[in-house]
Amino acid sequence: MQFYKDGFRGGNPDIKTAAPNRRDRQDNAPLPEKVDVLIVGTGPAGLCLAAQLAQFPDISTMIVEASPSNIVKGKADGLNTRTMEMLQAFGIADTVKRETYWVNQTSFWMPDADQPDTIKRIGRVQDVTDDSSEMPHTLINQARLHQLFLDVMDNAPARLVPDYNLALKDLSIDTSTEDHPVTVTLEDTGVNWGETTTIRANYVVGCDGARSKTRKAIGGKLMGDAAHQAWGVMDILANTDFPDIRQKCLITSANHGNVLILPREGGYLFRMYVELDKLGDDERVSERGFSQDDMIATAKRIMNPYTIDVKEVVWWSIYEIGHRMTDRFDDVDKGLDRDPRVFTAGDACHTHSPKAGQGMNVSMQDTFNLGWKLAHVLQGRAKASLLRSYSAERWAEAKRLVDTDHEWARIMSAPPGTSDLDNGDEPRFMRAFKENLEFTGGLAVQYDESALIGPPTHQALATGEEIGRRFHSAPVVRAADAMQMQLGHAAEADGRWRLYAFAGKDDTALRNLANWLEKDPNSPVVKHTGSDEDIDAVIDLRAVFQKTFDQLDYENMPPLLKPQTGKLGLIDFEKVFCLDHKGAGDIYDMRGIDREAGCLIVVRPDQYIAHVLPLDHYDDLATFFAGILLPV
């Protein structure tokens, strides 16, 4: 990490200098009358958005939560590899990796053909395929993830903290004004129960769950179907003779249903998803009165001949599988031509079963997509029409999630041996698991061509960095200090675009690009960066050379690759990278970079690849950014 750019300051470098204009948070301080962004809900989606916006003290952000505090236990627990890549940009991935359970293998169990009332292991599958990501698939208490985001918010320049015991009651939008057109009525859920207050906002983001009042206020409805199947989930501390208890397991029995086992952080805790009874078409799971004892008894029957001695039930819940989503993720009805003011994210606009491990992950990806766009608009870097892309991009991905999860839930609930679900010696649920590894890792997302995603004209220059997908990191060495690292880890959740320039056989084209970006009036760096800003404040150029660090002529790098930034004008020595020389991998070979010509990869602030271009296609680069960013 980099710090001291604006002068030496002792203490924890994660705690950034507080902005002088931040909100007064004294106990008796009144709530603000106006804010730029009001976030409703402190789940993963809301906190992910708040952690981004807290980095911009010139954007006034408020986040409210009906509960009196952060949760303590329960709810979601899986962080897929794509989410871990995102958390790296927030600076919390190392903490997550240290504290979590890593899912390395998944075991599959089925009825023993010789003793059908017992189960036996039929195979194992590597959970994260080689080089699909540099990050692991992890499991963690959702409350702990919340706290990590809360720490990022509290340490940010805005010193953002939630306003608890406040729930959204209603909202209205005045389309005749641009001055904080959303009027929000908040209701006290604490000691002043029922009292209301009104706040005006430029934008509202509803991250308030499946029963979202934000969604209802803008006329959104969750539509879809239910599987009419009851499931239970419990986090337990228990002793067992089951040999794979510290591995992720998918278990199907002959007559008693299915179990999914997820080991958890700490070495002792584990979660069990237990299939219970089928529900009638008009029956709700709450009508059955299932208890934790029902779950434990069913789990014991499914796990036969192995035993489970439960010592403590930490948390449990009963639910029924449903697959639903709204037709839009903002307040603009189809057919209307205006820019959105209210958005929904996460469970507020798409719900599904928890067994695919995607709910929390996709929810955070929703707001990671939205956050930089809100910042661009509110800071005057882009037109408000940019915000139309949020619903367009995320709705398509949510639809794919719901469809895939619907099929996965059907497979998991099917009895073993059903002919249309089996293929030779490999059960359908095991084959489906393998086929969906890219999806469950969060790595299958690909945004369609648009103003934010360029055409695949030059995709052949970087075959392993597909336009519309997330930037796939690979090992490099930082030239200045010979530091082995992942190239993608140079990016932070700071709202900046990244340009990764890969040198060809000759360095000349890359050096010419750097000089053009720094000085030419048509350069997007020149056109879209203020005179009072660091030259890399909007667009951050990083260069990768085919030489090793000891062969590189570092002292003669173009000025844009050694920019002077911050109040003191200090040189940034961390813009230039080389091939890894210690056997970790060659980024050109791993990502299909054209060694002869090199290329330029344009990466959005949310880590998705927007364009791949030849190093000398200056006009194409300028035109692309002119379609998104406003000139200063």
Image: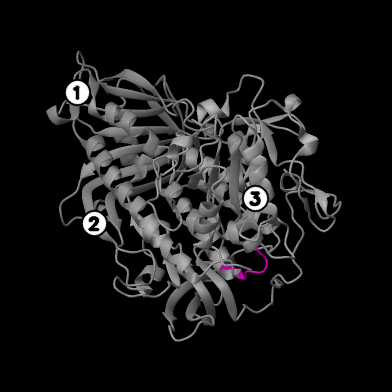
Q: Which residue is mark 1?
A: 423
Packing grade of label 2 (10 A; few <14, some 14-19, many >=20) is: some
Q: Quadrant of the C terminus?
A: bottom right
Quarter of the image with the N terminus is: top right
Q: CA distance from mark 3 to mark 1?
A: 50 Å
The first of marks 2 and 3 along the sequence is: 2
Residue 415 vertical placement versus 12 (above, below): above
Which one is in front, 127 or 469?
469
The amino acid at mark 3 is Asp
Work out whether residue 461 or residue 292 is closer to the camera in this orientation and state it: 461
| Chief SS of the magenta region | loop
Considering only vertical position in the picture, is 316 above or below 434? below
Local secondary structure at mark 1: strand
Of callouts 3 and 1, which one flags the residue occurring earlier in the amino acid sequence?
1
In the image, what residue type sits under mark 1? Answer: Asn
Residue 114 coordinates in the image, percent (x, y): 20, 13
- Is 535 inside the magenta-drawn segment? no
Q: Looking at the picture, does residue 313 appear above or below residue 364? A: above
* Horizontal and vertical percent position of residue 282: 16, 57
Highlighted range, magenta: 55-63
Residue 129 image offset from top left, x and y in percent: 44, 27
Task: Tell me the CA gap for discs 2 and 3.
Answer: 43 Å
Total of numbered circles in the picture? 3
Residue 540's tag is: 3
Q: Residues within 10 Å of mark 1 (few under 14, many from 20)?
A: few
Frontmost residue, 175 versus 554: 554
Q: Amino acid at mark 2?
A: Gly
Which of the pair 591/151 is nearer the observer?
591
Q: Which mark is residue 224?
A: 2
